[in-house]
Image (cartoon, grey):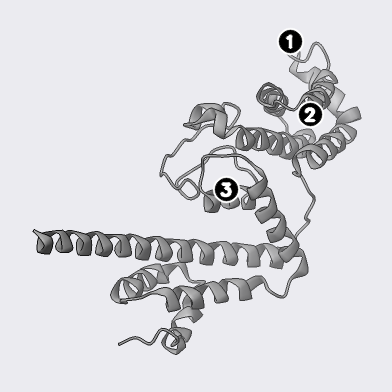
Amino acid sequence: MQKTHDTEPFQELVKHIANRYWKEVFLLTAEALANADNLLNVMKVKVNQIVAGDEKIQQFLVWVNEKSFSVSTSYKPAAVRDFYFSGCPLFLNEAIDPRGKASHTDGLDCVDMIENMDDDLDLCIDANLSYALEMSEIYASQSDPSFSFDLAINSAMQLTDDTDLYYELYDLYDQFPDDSWDDPGALHRWWQINGQAWSKQLQTVMIEYRNLGHTWQFLSEQKHLLQRYRIVLVIVRIVELSYSRKSSKCCCYRSLKLKDVKR
């Protein structure tokens, strides 16, 4: 019988936790255990150890957690954390959508991909603003510049119910040249002169009103650590979910058996 305090058998196993090809091994192990709590605890400790020695990464993870709890959404906490961990992607895919609802849009119409629009406006606003900032930073180097980042600003304006944020975004949007729709080159020429200051203004607005757009400037080795951290975290979640489903089925089965006995 497995002792509840015994984690020793799992210490060798968790050495392979950063290897995604071992995912099935962890799943099978959890399935075979009567109680997988010890395994999950050892895995979670290992997850934290990956980034424990890096202060900047710790600050980033604290921000991810705080930001995730500050928004109103119908998505599960783990999915929301992954959304901000990933930089507010412009579509939610199976990797971060706990309901398995895939939607491969460009994000400018992200309202269409969310089932409960009124509950998920925060994610839409943040996705559009993050996209606008990211695209504005690379806009000047594009040989065929795109208008999509100014459309993202417009989308965020239409979604927010924060009057102050709306007018800040309106001021940013209003700075674009009037003839940019008829002459795509006009925006590009305007950008060569004003783009850097505009991007900085957008970032300032995002930080003040949405706690978003911070400049982390991770080194390549820190990016690698974060990548490993995320892979391991996903494996832990999958094992946790698998074990949770198994436990639910067992409880349901026992409940049914008790009803049969009572009859």
Relative horizontal placement of residue 24, taking residue 261 as reference (left or right): right
Mark 3 secondary-structure assignment: helix
Residue 80 marker: 3
Mark 2 secondary-structure assignment: helix
In front: mark 1 or mark 3?
Answer: 3
Q: Residue at x 72, y 64 (%)?
A: 57
Q: Residue at x 75, y 60 (%)?
A: 218
Write down the residue under mark 1: 182
Mark 1 secondary-structure assignment: loop
Q: Earlier in the sequence, mark 2 or mark 1?
A: 2
Query: Image height check: is 59 above or below 95?
Result: below
Relative horizontal placement of residue 72, taking residue 9 as reference (left or right): right
Indicate the quadrant where residue 73 lies.
top right
Percent across and percent down for residue 2 are 34, 86
Q: Earlier in the sequence, mark 3 or mark 2?
A: 3
> Which residue is situated farthest in the front direction here?
262
| Amino acid residing under circle 2 | Leu
Percent across and percent down for residue 69 are 64, 49
Residue 165 marker: 2
Query: Image height check: is 176 above or below 251?
Result: above
